[in-house]
Image (tube, helix red, strand yellow):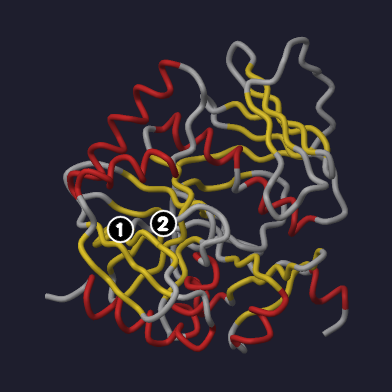
């Protein structure tokens, strides 16, 4: 495959849905799905506005020590600066996102479906959780964990086993009497050794960065962007040996979900988020999965989760 072919989006045309948003604008999308969603304006342009005060939040991803992100709150919108791409403007009330010009469109798209999408989905009343999600038999499983707990690798193992990947790093959950997952980008950002070790089919590489491979799930495997009923939450725990799956202690479910939720440090945002997280914790069964982080155990882990968490 030539470099030009590898960079060409597979989802040109009507496949523009992600996290329940129908992305509209002159932007090629590599990872979107078919279906319908709420309009989201996506444009490309140089953001001239600059913040005058301290950032609302700033962080450095654990696996990208050379990349910095700062988020600034304005009266009715946000400005986000990323050291390797530049300035984004996010207007959740519209909603609209302005992306910086870039020659790395596939990598930039994944940033669109990160913090900008989280701000828009939380303004809509949904929850943005640091979790992967997969679909098994028409029902969603949430694989919840902080970084370095193997959730991307486990989600990739579900994909290899024939199940649908709904999201890899951040999941959009819609709380309520019947909670659901709104599928995110059909993408995986995985370590080089994971990509080589799992031997995927039906996917292709869209970008590379040091130690990581960006993979797009093929159109035949990605499905629509329609909501999927949420059947169970699985908290990923590390263990020295074996695989063990037990119902989670209800006293810790709310605490752990809260720790994984994208929450702005403002009273209003925290209050709204808490009610949504509490509703999700009350409505959905939760499990603790203890397992070793080893390739050899992945098939057993997938079988254990499916047979236990989705039992009739």
- Which residue is painted at 22% across and 75% down in the image? 308
Could you tell me which quadrant the C terminus lies in? bottom left
- Which residue is painted at 62% across and 89% down in the image? 199
Give percent across and percent down for residue 89: 70, 29
Give percent across and percent down for residue 271: 35, 22
Q: CA distance from mark 1 to mark 2?
A: 7 Å
Q: Earlier in the sequence, mark 1 or mark 2?
A: 2
Give percent across and percent down for residue 299: 42, 87
Q: Which residue is mark 1?
A: 233
- Which residue is painted at 78% across and 48% down in the image? 65
- Give the number of marks: 2
Which residue is the extreme one toward the front?
240
Residue toward you, 289 or 228:
289
Q: Secondary structure at mark 1?
A: strand
Could you tell me which quadrant the N terminus lies in? bottom right
Q: Please tell me whether residue 53 is drawn above or below residue 243 in the rendered image.
A: above
Which mark, residue 200? none
| Quarter of image, res 304 | bottom left
Q: Secondary structure at mark 2?
A: strand
Q: Residues within 10 Å of mark 2 (few under 14, many from 20)?
A: many
Q: Please tell me whether residue 95 is drawn above or below residue 233 in the rendered image.
A: above
Give percent across and percent down for residue 9: 71, 67
Q: Which residue is mark 2?
A: 144
| Quarter of image, res 218 | bottom right
Asked whether disc 1 touches disc 2, contact meaning CB atoms under 8 Å apart, the reply is yes
- Which residue is painted at 28% across and 58% down in the image? 230
| Quarter of image, res 145 | bottom left
Q: Residues within 10 Å of mark 1 (few under 14, many from 20)?
A: many
Left/right placement of residue 261 relative to residue 186 reads: left
Left/right placement of residue 125 relative to residue 120 reads: left
């Amino acid at each position: 495959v030539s470099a030009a072919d590898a960079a060409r989006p597979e989802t040109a045309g009507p496949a523009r849905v992600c996290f329940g948003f129908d992305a509209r604008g002159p932007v090629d999308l590599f990872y979107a799905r078919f279906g319908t969603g709420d309009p989201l304006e996506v444009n490309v342009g140089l953001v001239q506005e600059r913040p005058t005060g301290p950032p609302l939040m700033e962080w450095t991803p654990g696996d990208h020590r050379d990349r910095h992100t700062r988020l600034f709150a304005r009266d009715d919108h946000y400005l986000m600066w990323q050291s390797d791409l530049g300035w984004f403007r996010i207007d959740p009330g519209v909603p609209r996102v302005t992306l910086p010009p870039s020659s790395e469109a596939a990598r930039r798209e994944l940033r669109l479906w990160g913090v900008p999408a989280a701000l828009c989905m939380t303004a809509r009343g949904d929850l943005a959780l640091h979790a992967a999600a997969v679909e098994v038999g028409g029902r969603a499983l949430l694989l919840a964990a902080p970084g370095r707990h193997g959730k991307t690798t486990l989600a990739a193992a579900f994909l290899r086993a024939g199940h649908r990947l709904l999201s890899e790093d951040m999941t959009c959950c819609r709380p309520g009497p019947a909670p659901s997952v709104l599928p995110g980008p059909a993408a995986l950002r995985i370590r080089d050794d994971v990509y080589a070790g799992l031997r995927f089919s039906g996917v292709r590489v869209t970008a590379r960065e040091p130690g990581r491979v960006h993979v797009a799930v093929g159109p035949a495997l990605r499905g629509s962007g329609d909501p999927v009923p949420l059947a169970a939450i699985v908290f990923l725990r590390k263990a020295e040996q074996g695989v063990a799956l037990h119902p989670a202690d209800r006293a810790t479910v709310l605490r752990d979900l809260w720790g994984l939720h994208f929450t702005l440090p403002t009273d209003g945002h925290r209050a709204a988020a808490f009610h949504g997280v509490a509703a999700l914790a009350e409505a959905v069964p939760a499990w603790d999965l203890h397992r070793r982080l080893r390739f050899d155990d992945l098939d057993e882990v997938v079988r254990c989760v499916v047979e236990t968490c989705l039992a009739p």
